[in-house]
Image (cartoon, grey):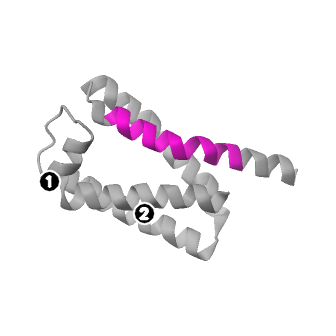
Amino acid sequence: MKKITLIYLAAYLTIGGIGFGFFPSFAIKIFMSTGDYGDVMPRMVGMFMIVLGLLIITIVKNEDYKYYLPTIIARTFILVFMVYLYFITDDILFIFLIVIVSLGLLPSIFVYLKDKTVGA
């Protein structure tokens, strides 16, 4: 199950990163954004998403799950920060991103807690 949750994470990071990095206007339009982020900021966000996606792919490829908990902690921080961004911008883009991240984070937390109770 860890592998599946990380594949989902790698997929949305890499695909989303390509979208924001190389097709920012299209990506912003898909998420029905009401904000104006210019052309450079989405590309920079896309660059970071691609890099993070490649790191997650490496974790999955090597089946090195010792970094599973840090991925949960990082996504939790990202989720909380995106909620904050939504409230200060009122941009629906962040609702879409919150849903995408939550769909991967919640099963990851469940898998982590289940592994902890089984291993205890």
| Type of amino acid under label 1 | Val
Q: Nearer the viewer, residue 85 or 29?
A: 29
Q: Nearer the viewer, residue 109 or 28?
A: 28
Do labels 1 and 2 touch, CB within 8 Å? no
Relative to residue 112, is residue 83 drawn left or right?
left
**Location of residue 92 with respect to 42 vertically, above or below:** above
Disc 1 and disc 2: Cα gap in Å?
20 Å
Relative to residue 17, is residue 36 drawn left or right?
left
Give the magenta part as a residue range: 94-111
| Type of amino acid under label 2 | Gly
* Residue 66 location (% of width, % of height): 66, 63
Q: Residue at x 24, y 44 (%)?
A: 30
* Residue 40 location (% of width, % of height): 14, 53
Question: Can residue 41 be seen at all in this image of the molecule?
Answer: no
Residue indicated by mark 1: 40
* Residue 60 location (% of width, % of height): 57, 69
Q: Residues within 10 Å of mark 2 (few under 14, many from 20)?
A: many
* Residue 112 location (% of width, % of height): 70, 49
Quadrant of the frame with the N terminus: bottom right
Relative to residue 107, is residue 12 drawn left or right?
left
Residue indicated by mark 2: 53
Q: Residue at x 38, y 40 (%)?
A: 97
- Please tell me the numbered disc located at residue 93: none
